[in-house]
Image: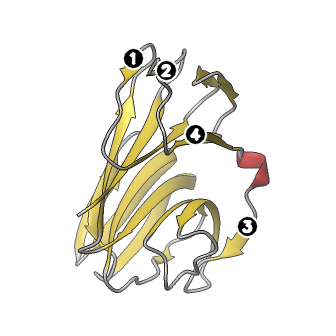
Amino acid sequence: MIRFLPASARVPQPWKNGGGVTREVLVWPPQASMTDFDWRISMATVDAAGPFSAFDGIDRHLSVLSGQLRLTVDGVAHQLVVGQGLAFAGDAPASGEPLDGPVIDLNVMTRRGRFTALVTCIPPQVRLTPCDGQTVLLAIAATDVCSHKLKTYDAVWLDDWPTEGAVNGNSALIRIDIANT
């Protein structure tokens, strides 16, 4: 089954630490909270320097969708620009500082020891092949995929792949594959 996840339907909610706002793309199991999810995909706007929320027992992958971010994890600074990401332990001390204006980021979090995530950028006109597990495709800009016209930051969840496969349209996608460990 292909499920359309429009960006316009995402409801802002406070970060776990209250320092900003996040918009959930998808969570498993459905209706899970910030403390009992198995995996979670969300987007956030970072418009001021500050600490990131701690997530004990969670592995995290943060990708920059817009802007530039100095992400410091365990005292090591990483400067990330659009299209770059970093995987790190969700319980490691982390903070972010937007450089030259607000940052929009994508967060993929999985319960350590139960699930893993692979986050990749897929160029236009590429045939997408199934993985073992779940796949979410997030549009970086307007594109067509799996018979859906996606606007910027819309997504589709492919929990059952179409028999003809899928081809990315005219813009890059972020592909998130989530598998059981």
Classify mark 3: residues with Cα within 10 Å, few (<14), some (14-19) or many (20+): few
Mark nearest the camera among 2 and 3 is 2
Going from N to C along the chain, the mark reached first, 3 or 1, is 3
Q: In the displayed structure, would residue 53 be above or below residue 98?
A: below
Q: Residue at x 45, y 66 (%)?
A: 97
Q: CA distance from mark 4 to mark 2?
A: 17 Å
Mark nearest the camera among 3 and 1 is 1
Circle number at residue 12 = 3
Q: Residue at x 48, y 40 (%)?
A: 160
Going from N to C along the chain, the mark reached first, 3 or 4, is 4
Image quarter of residue 156:
top right
Q: CA distance from mark 3 to mark 1?
A: 32 Å
Which residue position is annotated with label 2?
Answer: 168
Mark nearest the camera among 4 and 2 is 4
At mark 4, the secondary structure is loop
Residue 148 or 92: which is nearer the viewer? 148
* Percent position of residue 33, x then y: 58, 81
Circle number at residue 1 = 4
At mark 2, the secondary structure is loop
Classify mark 4: residues with Cα within 10 Å, few (<14), some (14-19) or many (20+): few
Q: CA distance from mark 4 to mark 1?
A: 20 Å
Mark nearest the camera among 4 and 1 is 4
Which residue position is annotated with label 1?
Answer: 126
State if disc 1 and disc 2 touch (CB < 8 Å). Answer: yes
